[in-house]
Amino acid sequence: MTRKHFVFLSLSVIFLFVRGTQTLAQEVEPRIQVNVDMVQLNVAVTDNKGNYITGLKPKDFAITEDRIPQKIAVASEGNAPASTLAGLTPSDSSSSAEADQSEGPDRPQSTAQRLGLLAPGANIFILFDTSNYMYRGFVYAQDAIADFVRSLENPNKVAFYSYSHDLSRASLLTSDRSQVLRGVRTTVAGDEAALYNCLLLTVKDAARYTGRKVIVVFSNGPDNASMVPPEDVAELAQSTGIVIYMISTRLAQLEPVSIAVFERMTKATGGKVYFAKNWKEENKAFASIRDDLAHLYSLSYYPQPNPNRGWRTITVKLVGPNLKGYHIRTRNGYRIQAAQVSAGMPPITELQDSVTK
């Protein structure tokens, strides 16, 4: 064999080896798609006295994401049906390639699910503390939750979960109030409290649904058994558009760390925290949550093209001279979620096993 042929053969072998290695890497390397399509915000607008401002229109709001102006595509107020703004589609605010290959933090996966964004009301998940902190006030808390469930207007769907060391899904999401009330009355007091473990599972359950998603937590004491940090729970709730309300009783108030965590978590998601010293204040807290839900504005948009694949900061302002001085409460951003995390999560039983062991 001549030297020239030997060199040619060597180069050919090297080329085929390198190309085969690249092909194998492409086959093995997972394809990660990001969620950047539909974003839904739940926005409360109040004056200096805490009174709700009603009757605002989409044109009264200015939304930016990483300082990039956004166009509202779907809007509603309270429990009224949502309406789409004429002429706005995903292609108006993102490239066709991005729209085809990505899913938003609240983006429906089909036409039927897309219509879910237009449905009135909210999907409300109640998470009730049944740990050993609850022995004294158990019955009073059950009564307060039952009254709250009965008072909710018909468009809302409700799920009732309870927790101590593990999560119990006593009633899955339903419009049947009697089923939820049965779940409330059949709960029993348990042992130590793993609030953040169980709240994470509840967030993942709620994230599966379209439209407005709300979690109402009734906690009677600090968390003493979780492996999950509360910051992870709050960030996932932010990124999936879930509002968290927390009602904390006297025992939790004695723990400064719990107070700080509850306040940060609810503020990050656009919700509220209430500290109730007795059963009367518990009832007032639930009534305040019901009132808040009835006055939230739901605003959805398709993000403008944005190279940021991490945390995206959302800012909502009111425009117009007559709207100055009002206060806005909503989540302040979200983190891009990989498609396999949102669309390919393990079954509920696997999630529970992985967190509560």
Image (tube, rainbow, N blue to C red):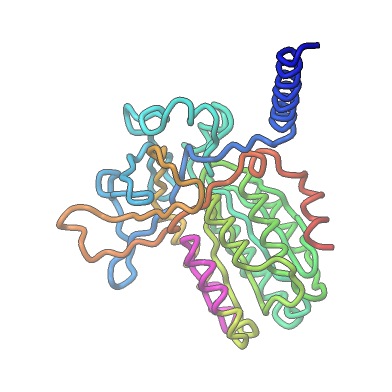
Tell whether position 265 is magenta: yes
Q: Is residue 46 above or below residue 155?
A: below
Q: Is residue 182 left or right of residue 259?
A: right
Residue situated in front as seen by the camera: 232 or 89: 232
298 relative position to 8: left or right: left
Residue 140: x percent and y percent? 67, 76
Q: Seen from this angle, which residue lies furthest bottom? A: 254
- Which quadrant does the C terminus fall into? bottom right
Check if residue 281 falls in the magenta segment.
Answer: yes
- Residues in magenta, as a range: 260-283
The image quadrant that residue 57 belongs to is top left
Dominant secondary structure (helix, strand or loop) of the stretch shown in magenta:
helix
User: In the picture, which quadrant includes the N terminus?
Assistant: top right
Residue at 73 percent of width and 52 percent of height? 171
Determine whether 46 is above or below 33 in the image: below
Q: Examine the rendered structure and indicate whether residue 235 appears above or below residue 258.
A: above
Residue 288, relative to residue 151: is it above or below? below
Q: Nearer the viewer, residue 20 or 121?
A: 20
- Observer-nearest of 276 and 319: 319
The residue that appears at 48% across and 26% down in the rendered structure is: 97
Residue 196 percent coordinates (x, y): 68, 67
Taking the image as shown, residue 36 lies to the left or right of residue 343, namely left
Q: Relative to the observer, which residue lies in front, 24 or 162?
A: 24
User: Residue at 57% of width from left, 32% of height from top?
Assistant: 113
Name which residue lies at 78% across and 79% down: 132
Residue 261: % across, % down: 57, 74
On screen, residue 154 versus residue 76, left or right, reads: right
Among all residues in the image, which is located at the extreme left?
321
